[in-house]
Image (cartoon, rainbow, N blue to C red):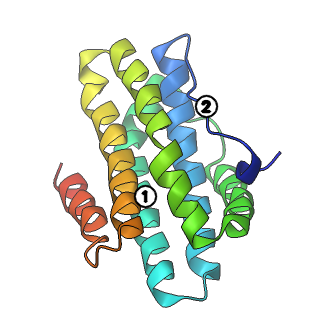
Amino acid sequence: MTLAHRMIEAKVFATFDEGFRASYEDELRGEGFFASLAALDPIPRRAEVWSKMLAIEQVTTQALLSAAQALGVASRDPQALRAEGAAEADDWRVLGWHGALLVMRDEFPVYLTEFGGLLAQSPPAYAPLIDLLIRHEVAFIDFAAAELAGQADSMDVLDDYLVWARAT
């Protein structure tokens, strides 16, 4: 079953370490996912959006890396995870631009629920990293809502996140 035929469901994790591992691995998949979309989108503005989302995944993954290593949850091959993400991008190409924006706006809030649960399990030292995960999803959701509303400055929210995350 492809993304085009199912709703995204929030995951519930038995432990913080399990949730952090899944989140870290999903960020690596996200790098492959958005890199694939950026590379193959023939429309320059959309390729730029996908590239900004790739940059968001990269800065987020980099921020999580030290903690993932310290927790011992960075064990899977990053390139294999990126390849999995690139393969998932095929489902989104079927959705088209408008469909992808609808998924981001309407289904990505599930990740806020997922990360909220992870934040509740988080040791205090890791809470800022979970906040980073939450904020990056909010950037994607806010972008999609602005883009669907026809706002010319819809990409600003992506740029704002990148500036904030790089300064954090």
Q: Position of residue 95 (x, y in %)?
A: 68, 64
Judge depth for marks 2 and 1 and give the one in front. 2
Q: Is residue 141 above or below residue 154?
A: above
When the figure is inspected, residue 16 is found, relative to residue 24, above or below; the finding is: above
Q: Secondary structure at mark 2?
A: loop
Amino acid bearing label 1: Gln
Label annotation for residue 9: 2
Q: Position of residue 65 (x, y in %)?
A: 42, 42
In the image, taking residue 138 as reference, residue 58 lies left or right, namely right
Residue 162 place in picture, x, y as percent: 27, 61
Considering depth in this image, is 107 or 10 the residue closer to the camera? 107
Q: Quadrant of residue 121?
A: top left
Q: Residue at x 49, y 89 (%)?
A: 44
Q: Amino acid at mark 2?
A: Glu
Q: Which residue is labeled 1 in the image?
A: 58
Q: Is disc 1 surrounded by few (<14), some (14 to 19) or many (20+) residues within 10 Å?
A: some
How far is the residue under mark 2 from the one under mark 1?
23 Å
Per the image, label 1 sits on a secondary structure element best described as helix
